Image: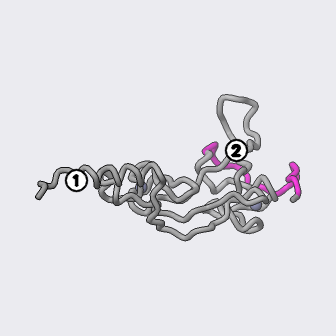
Amino acid sequence: MTTPTKTTKRPRGGRADPHDPHFFTCALDGATLDPTGYCPTGHGYPAFVWFWATGGTNPPYPRWVKVMTECPIACPICTARLDWAGGCLRCNGSRTPDDLATWTFPGDRYDYDTSGHWMKTVTGPQAVLSDAEFSAVLQGVRQMMAMKPST
Ligand SMILES: [Zn+2]
Ligand SMILES: [Zn+2]
């Protein structure tokens, strides 16, 4: 792994928007990221990137700022930003979020690699519930069964 220097070629100009991947450079290997934020050198999404900040609360500007990345992938159901596990905090991967039994991980799962890149490890959607979610589902089923008239 090489540490990028000030001579590393980075995109010029741009907005100080940490969510806009167009002006980002991988902070781990200096590669120019594709428009989705993917690093062709690390074969994953870098955990840290440089971006060209033109304004903000910590002058001087403009300058290069190193920031931690968020998962750039949108939820296929509600278009909110997914987390790295492929989960969606807004809709819980369901078109009927009130029904816990329908919760899913709508996206792919990414795990942090030793190179500092997020690597895809599971292709979504994943119909997996966490322990807490599973317990909630079980509780709901028990309540339904308890409402049935006993014979
Ligand atoms: Zn990289
Ligand atoms: Zn969603």
148 left or right, relative to 141 = left
The image's colouring method is one colour
State which quarter of the image contains the C terminus.
bottom left
Under mark 2, the amino acid is: Val
Residue range of the region highlighted in magenta in the rendering? 2-17
Q: Residue at x 50, y 53 (%)?
A: 81
SS at mark 1 in the image: helix
Nearest to the observer: residue 30 or residue 131: 131
Nearest to the observer: residue 94 or residue 33: 94
| Residue 16 is inside the magenta segment | yes
| Residue 10 is inside the magenta segment | yes
Q: Residue at x 71, y 29 (%)?
A: 58
Label annotation for residue 26: none
Q: Where is residue 41 in the image (x, y as percent from the top left)?
A: 77, 67
Q: Position of residue 9 (x, y in %)?
A: 82, 57
Number of numbered labels in the structure image:
2
Label 1 belongs to which residue? Answer: 144
* CB at disc 2 and ligand 1 closer than 8 Å: no
79 left or right, relative to 32 = left
Question: Badge 2: few (under 14), some or many (20 or more) residues near its Cα, within 10 Å?
Answer: some
